[in-house]
Image (tube, helix red, strand yellow):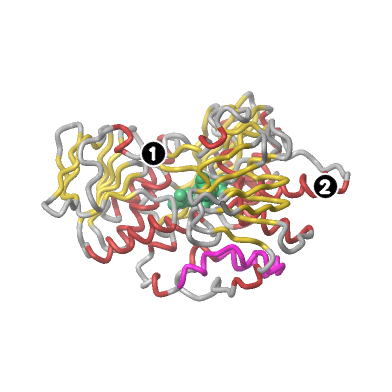
Amino acid sequence: MAEKHFKYVILGGGVAAGYAAREFVKLGLNPGELAIISKESVAPYERPALSKGYLFPQDVHNLSFAKLTIYSMVLQDYQGFMSVLAVAEKDCFQNGMLRKDITFMAGIELMLGTEIVKADLASKTLTSAADVIIKYDILIIATGSTVIRLSDFGVQGADANNIFYLREIDDADKLVAAIHAKKDGKAVIVGGGYIGLELGAALKINNLDVTMVYPEPWCMPRLFTAGIAAFYEGYYANKGIKIIKGTVAVGFDSDANGDVTAVKLKDGRVLEADIVVVGVGGRPLITLFKGQVEEEKGGIKTDGFFKTSIPDVYAVGDVATFPLKLYNEQRRVEHVDHARKSAEQAVKAIKAAEEGKPIEEYDYLPYFYSRSFDLSWQFYGDNVGDTILFGDNDPTSAKPKFGTYWIKEGKVVGVFLESGSPEENKSIAKVAKLQPPVQDPEQLEKEGLAFASKI
Ligand SMILES: Cc1cc2nc3c(=O)[nH]c(=O)nc-3n(C[C@H](O)[C@H](O)[C@H](O)COP(=O)(O)OP(=O)(O)OC[C@H]3O[C@@H](n4cnc5c(N)ncnc54)[C@H](O)[C@@H]3O)c2cc1C
């Protein structure tokens, strides 16, 4: 049985892994000290691009996957990388900007296509599916999330061909192949969250006839208010996307080849389909560590340095349930901004501990965003309490711009903004962080974005 030993091991090869690796290099890493173990066959990359630029129709697959790679971060050209990153998701498949030679990664062992099937935290040992033993001094768990599948609930016919889920590059590649094979065909999107909305747009841009189905009264109900959702639903309808709410997919028909042909809805309707994309949520991948490490709220419990209850074991990104200082509670956050920042914090903490230096605890302001068609929204803070909608949220406007404030106990605690400029987005982030008091909600509604700009 092959055995390897590393000072640092990052288990998982996604967003958090890439940012952790970059931070290690930044703070000083000797060759051979770090291994990244990933069951994906490619280097860490910016996962959000999979539901955006990666699916755009400009023959994207002629450009190599390397454009997505965040190894370019480890070039130690931080400023250069950040400017590339800023445009990466929009443009990465339309030009060669991120195409990089990754040989500079020499010194970091990339164990790709390697699935860890056993983790023994007591003996600091990981075992791969191919029976390779990997020992570590310090482990960073960055296994992220996996999708919830309709077949998990025994939905009839859910194993038919051309029913897709989107989490990894392989999923996106299969979807792109189906988009080409089913040119101008019919697509049904099951789910009205992030993935549903972004995929609905991406498939429409690819000229498919798109119908979205979700059980809730409006899309993205975990974040959007009815007022916010009405804009996106109207906008999507104007783009020709049909939306069916208040029902769920209960079965699928397929042809003799096993290809999906129709989606059966609970309300009795049957929708023709050449492609189905399901986005009904995810769950953190922590089963490897069950019973070995303290858990909370469905994730691995950490402190403000992403240390778990087991010495020398850190957890970052989607799997970590960490102290969210601003709200004085433990939270798990499944968003890319936190994946990046938690990874950097964990590596800073590891390095500081080695040098006997203190660092500040993680002080995170929740930040989520999404893009589809020409739209782009950002949200900062907490979506709790009363809401005030402001601005132009008419989906037929040439340049809609609107937002929402969430007010709890007389203070603004969360802000959403569609089509904000970089300065405006900065100002709503500041509001969410500073939580200014609101004396007069009517005045706030009148002021709208101007309120944030004054803070
Ligand atoms: C299509 C899509 C679009 C998204 N868009 C947005 C967005 O617009 N905005 C936003 O804020 N967030 C978005 N997200 C969420 C964001 O990408 C995640 O929160 C982020 O990727 C989490 O980073 P992570 O490193 O914790 O996990 P991941 O990036 O998922 O990486 C986990 C890695 O661990 C590997 N792994 C897991 N188990 C094992 C094992 N046993 N052995 C070996 N390897 C293993 C996986 O293969 C994967 O490579 C999106 C997610 C998806 C899937």
Which residue of the protein is positioned furthest toward the right in this rendering? 356
Magenta stretch holds residue 65: yes
Q: Residue at x 67, y 45 (%)?
A: 139
Left or right of 429, for residue 416:
left
| Magenta stretch bounds | 64-87
380 lies above or below 376: above
Viewer-proximal residue among 189 and 371: 189
Which residue of the protein is positioned furthest toward the left in this rendering? 256
- Residue 352 is labelled as 2
Viewer-proximal residue among 75 and 290: 290
Residue 417 at least partly seen:
no
276 lies above or below 312: below
Q: Which SS does the magenta portion mostly show?
A: helix
Residue type, mark 2 in image: Ala
Q: What element carries label 1?
A: loop
Left or right of 174, for residue 141:
right
Q: How far apart are marks 1 and 2 (CA)?
A: 38 Å
Residue type, mark 1 in image: Ile
Q: Is mark 1 within 8 Å of ligand 1?
A: no
Viewer-proximal residue among 160 and 236: 160
Q: Which residue is drawn at 14% across and 41% down?
A: 270
Q: Where is residue 61 in the image (x, y as percent from the top left)?
A: 39, 70
**What is the quadrant of residue 58 in the picture?**
bottom left
Q: Position of residue 384 (x, y in %)?
A: 55, 29
Viewport quadrant of the C terminus: top right
**What is the quadrant of residue 107 in the picture?**
bottom right
Badge 1 is on which residue?
148
